Image (tube, rainbow, N blue to C red):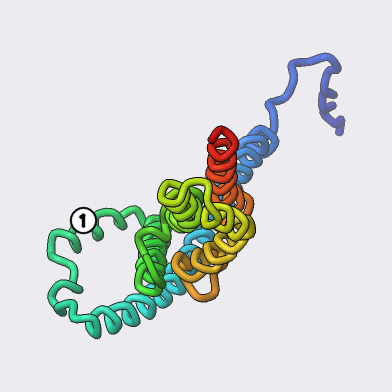
Amino acid sequence: MSETAVPAPRSGGPATDADPAEAAWPDYIAAARQLDGVRRAAATAAGEQARSVAAAREELTAVREQLAAQQSRLRERGVPAISLMPTPPEVSEAARSMTAGPAAVLACLRTAKGWADAADDTLAARGLPRLARWPTHPRNLLVYGPLALVVPLVQLVLFLVTGTGPASIAALVVGLPMPAVAFMVGWLAVGRLFRPCQEDRVDRTPRFGALVCLIPAVLATAGIVLAMLAG
């Protein structure tokens, strides 16, 4: 019995179809990378939100304690209790400003903390609380200036009254060290009057104060001496 021969495949025939798994592999890789990026972004956002929530809670606790202490101090100073409570429009406005999430809440709480710190400075201010917040040079001039004018004015009055007599000469001699005395008194007074809080250091502007105390004395002395020489 004869066997039927099976024809062998011809070389150089048409190419076979591509494997579907190999064709889908690049799409799978791209989708996996995109999914991993979304997952990482979500994890980062969740971590940042968690940190914002934790920070907001800490800030809220600190602000509450600070406001409670301020409320007690204001009540002791006679402020009515109703004045210490926010009005409904103020509450609504504050609520609208915090609808953007934990980050917005944290920003609002930090702003409130700044206002509370400013209120603490005002309540703890010593001497002249409003003037303590002026620019340092104009503020300190209110102390150094009058002290620097006392002795020159006395010298001028004595010279106008007595002329070139012994009293005017004695006033000139006694007035020579007085700018240093005026500066020291002003230096102490600035620290006493304009210190916002007990733990803060006030800027006494010593060079500026020394010039303020010295210039009037020099001008007054020079004018009196010239008047004596001319007379």
Q: Is residue 135 visible?
A: no
Query: In the rendered image, which quarter is residue 89 located in?
Result: bottom left
Camera-side residue of 147 and 99? 147
Which residue is found at the position 44% from the left and 70% from the top? Answer: 59
User: Looking at the image, is 12 positioned above or below residue 165?
Assistant: above
Which residue is found at the position 35% from the left and 60% from the top? Answer: 130
Q: Is residue 198 visible?
A: yes
Which residue is found at the position 24% from the left and 60% from the top? Answer: 95
- Number of marks: 1
Q: Which residue is mark 1?
A: 93
Camera-side residue of 216 and 200? 216
Which residue is found at the position 46% from the left and 74% from the top? Answer: 58
Query: In the rendered image, which quarter is residue 70 located in?
Result: bottom left
Instruction: Determine crowd level at label 1: few under 14, some 14-19, many 20+ residues with C-alpha closer than 10 A.
Output: few
Camera-side residue of 223 and 109? 223
Image quadrant containing the N terminus: top right
Q: Position of residue 153 (x, y in %)?
A: 44, 51
Q: Position of residue 146 (x, y in %)?
A: 44, 55
User: Looking at the image, is 66 positioned above or below residue 148?
Assistant: below
Q: Position of residue 86 (x, y in %)?
A: 18, 68
| Helix, strand or loop under label 1 | helix
Please give left or right for residue 31 compared with residue 11 in the image. left
Please give left or right for residue 77 compared with residue 41 in the image. left
Q: Amino acid at mark 1?
A: Glu
Query: In the rendered image, which quarter is residue 61 located in?
Result: bottom left
Q: Position of residue 25 (x, y in %)?
A: 67, 38
